[in-house]
Amino acid sequence: MDSNTVLFGVIGDPIRHSKSPIMLNRAFRERNVNGAYAAFHVKPNQLENAIAGVRGLGFRGLNVTIPHKIEVMAYLDEISEGAKAAGAVNTIVNDNGRLIGYNTDGIGYVRSLKEEAEPDIAGKTIVVLGAGGAARGILWALAQENPAAILIANRTESKAKELAASFSPDYRISSLPWGDLRAACSNADIVINTTSVGMSPNVNELPIDPTWLKSGSVASDLIYNPLKTAFLLQAEQVGCKIHSGLGMFIYQGAYAFEYWTGQPAPVEAMREVVLESFV
Ligand code: ATR
């Protein structure tokens, strides 16, 4: 760090568990960017001041995590189409004083799915389990890949209906009763768990019975703690290709790095440093 160091950070509440600082600082080092990235514990009643601080101190970029991803939009100058569709911002670019909000979670998820499990999503049938913020965050990015259908199933069916209805019919997103999941999963090419079921410490819980999945299909989980959920471990046993949520975390950071610096992200170095931090 010196007098030319450009500042970045992540705000959230809580924030001390975040692996973004080690991941982004490693990326800056790898690409010789004179940048520094820190974690800031910002309570909801300080959000407006925190964004004013970004402007005042001339931070180049900020990541935004729970619980600020929705509320932060009120303090920005422009919101990207993808962030509008996701209903949330996780990355801010400070473009000469103009704060632009993006959502790199959805596109990060899709890039990791393509790199790590299914390069060609076009024409595929996708089942999404869950209809909360995490599901909303990936739907628009998935729809951009032109799948044959995206079926959302949620324990509380009304939320799945509402979420599906919030997208244009062109995106081929519809809802599915939870009771129809068995048949839908046996036909699906990709099944994605966006629910919190299986997240540490409840590592033995399953969102659905993995024996419903078609052998050779992709089972994907947004959860990355644990790295392999019970859903993925059992899906692997029935012959599925599995895809962990860690990739989404790495690639949402990779896109943020690319928006801020204009350089390709050093994805493997970022993955390596995050994996090291788990042990
Ligand atoms: P997030 O913003 O992380 O998606 P959320 O909005 O609280 O979190 O959504 C959690 C999702 O997990 C919801 O789809 C929830 O289903 P409900 O809408 O029926 O609550 C789903 N979920 C949580 N626990 C579940 C369980 N035991 N079985 C099935 N779905 C569950």
Image (cartoon, rainbow, N blue to C red):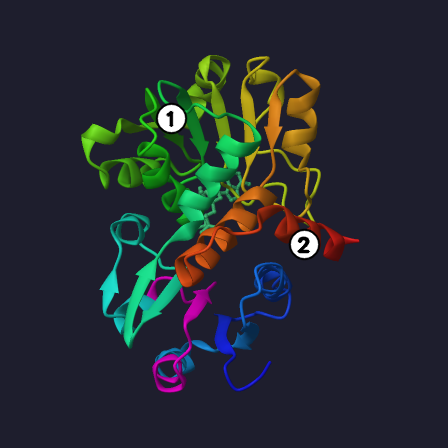
Establish whether ligand 1 lies closer than 8 Å to the Cβ of label 2.
no
Q: Residue at x 39, y 84 (%)?
A: 53
- Image spot of residue 164 (x, y percent): 28, 36
- Name the residue that disc number 2 marks: 274
- Image spot of residue 276 (x, y percent): 75, 53
Q: Residue furthest front?
A: 32
From the viewer's perspective, tell me whether residue 45 is left or right of residue 208: left
Q: Earlier in the sequence, mark 1 or mark 2?
A: 1
Using the image, determine if residue 274 lies above or below residue 108. Answer: below
How far is mark 1 from mark 2, CA to CA? 37 Å
Neighbourhood count class around disc 2 (C-alpha, 10 Å): few under 14, some 14–19, many 20 upward: many
Work out whether residue 52 or residue 94 is closer to the camera in this orientation and state it. Answer: 94
- Say whether residue 54 is magenta: yes
Q: Which residues are magenta?
A: 52-71
Using the image, determine if residue 152 lies above or below residue 6. Answer: above
- Name the residue that disc number 1 marks: 177
Which amino acid type is shown beneath numbered disc 1? Pro
From the viewer's perspective, tell me whether residue 131 is left or right of residue 96: right
Q: Which mark is residue 273?
A: none
- Image spot of residue 240 (x, y percent): 61, 20
From the viewer's perspective, tell me whether residue 21 is left or right of residue 75: right
At mark 1, the secondary structure is: loop
Work out whether residue 263 or residue 188 is closer to the camera in this orientation and state it. Answer: 263
Which amino acid type is shown beneath numbered disc 2? Val
